[in-house]
Amino acid sequence: MPLLTILFCLLLLVVLVSWAKVNPFLAFLIVSITAGLMLGIPLEKVTASVQKGLGDTLSSITIIICLGAMLGKLVADSGAAQKIAEVLVGAFGVKHIQWALVLVGFIIGIPLFYNTGFVLVVPLIFSVVYKYKLPAVYIGLPMLAALSVTHGFLPPHPAPSALVLIFHANMGKTLMFGLIIAVPAIVIAGPVFSRTLKNIPSVPLETFRAEELPEDKLPSSANSFLTALLPVILLMVTTVYLNIDHSNGAVHKLVAFIGDTPIVMLISLITATFTLGINQGKSMKHLGDIYGDAVKDISLILLIIAGSGAFKQVLTDSGISNNITAILQSANLQPLVLGWLIAAIIRISLGSATVAGLTAAGILSSMVLHDPSINPNLMVLSIGAGSLAFSHVNDGGFWLFKEYFNLSIKDTIRSWSVMESIISVIGLVGVLVLNQFV
């Protein structure tokens, strides 16, 4: 019965948004409250559950998305994105620009949370799309596939790192095995799969579309790359330092503070204000208008993501994940396949890769720790792969992609959801193949 309730609520959400044309944020509120009541959450606690989901989601991403949008719009309006696109095309050629973006996405994805990486790479994707008149989904999806793979498979991302600790795995071996699996997953789910998506109509957000500037008005290549990638540089440097210095002294605390993602984004925006703004002859009033327009353009996206967080919280509070895992634990499956399946079903039901991964790990931790035949490093990757399966309407990442690329739900499922599923399946296959040799 609980699984049928979830299915009904997901169908209701799709019908409200796609057929009835209800604003997605309002649709999420309606469906979240409906799900809470149908799943037995007490009347007096349904609203609290919805508010908690909204608050928790907004508290974690509002600063990042808003500052990222400001930085992205400045990078676009200043001509930095145009310069970066020209350099990449000059190095790889228009024919191979996808591979350049995949490489950048992979490098950016290693140190960054997914949402942070997304809002940083989108302006770069759109600058290439607009300048060279290329299909947006075809060009952008491979780069986002690289981000997804690093998010699900590779430490030091939070979920894989937590799974390493839970299963007493080896961080280095997990990273090495993860890199082996990451390459085919990115290639197949990215450049190969995207060839089927060239005809998807997409008119991306106007906020990242800037007039093409003459060459003498563009910032230098060094200024463009360093400013646009400053968040990545800061996060990589602070992460490396914190992994080396395990003390609790003042310097360690200062570096940890600077390396906190909201602080990194604020430092990066302040820096860009000077390097791409004031030094390029822009007034503070003009820069203020740029930043204000950027926030206006992504405000509805924030609400939609918050709505998906409310839905996820209601499902979590209802205890539905316990019902799912009880059913699956009775099945006689190979442990690595079982880990992937538990994570995948929780992910599809709740919409959160992190919740899916940690829930599956909690269920299987005792089995893995007491059965020496199970490779804990591969179990980390198997669950990580399962946690990426079929992102759809209850996942904030789904709505980020849909709204930024301005797609229909059908085309978002056809592109984004299938891409995530390909990564998940390739990850499982890779784990099972490695299990034969290690």
Image: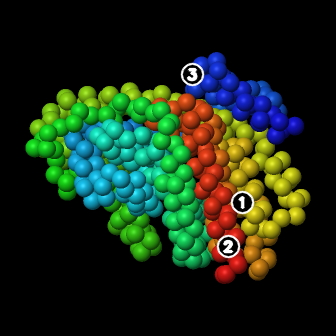
For the residue labelled by badge 1, is the local secondary structure a helix, a strand or a loop? helix
Compared with residue 430, is residue 349 higher up or lower down, i.e. above or below? above
236 in relation to 377, above or below? above
Image-based side of 131 in relation to 192, left or right: left
Q: Position of residue 197 (x, y in %)?
A: 52, 43
Q: Marks 2/1: CA distance? A: 14 Å
Q: Are marks 2 and 3 in contact (CB under 8 Å)?
A: no
* Circles 1 and 3: CB atoms closer than 8 Å: no
Mark found first going from the N terminus, 2 or 3: 3
Q: Quadrant of the C terminus?
A: bottom right
In the rendered image, which quarter is residue 393 located in? Answer: top right
* 435 to 380, vertically: above or below: below
Tag 2 residue: 433
Residue pointed to by mark 1: 340
Q: CA distance from mark 1 to mark 3?
A: 34 Å
Taking the spot 67% from the left edge, 39% from the top edge, the residue there is 313
Give the label, 2 or 1, closer to the camera. 2
Residue type indicated by callout 1: Trp
**Image mark count:** 3
Q: Where does residue 88 sit, x and y in percent of width and height?
A: 29, 55
Mark linked to residue 23: 3
Q: Toward the viewer: 159 or 419?
A: 419
Amino acid type, mark 2? Val
Q: Looking at the image, is mark 1 or mark 3 earlier in the sequence?
A: 3
Q: Look at the numbered disc 3 and give the secondary structure of its residue.
A: loop
Q: Residues within 10 Å of mark 1 (few under 14, many from 20)?
A: many
- Work out which quarter of the rendered image holds the N terminus and state it: top right
Image position, residue 33 (x, y; %): 71, 27
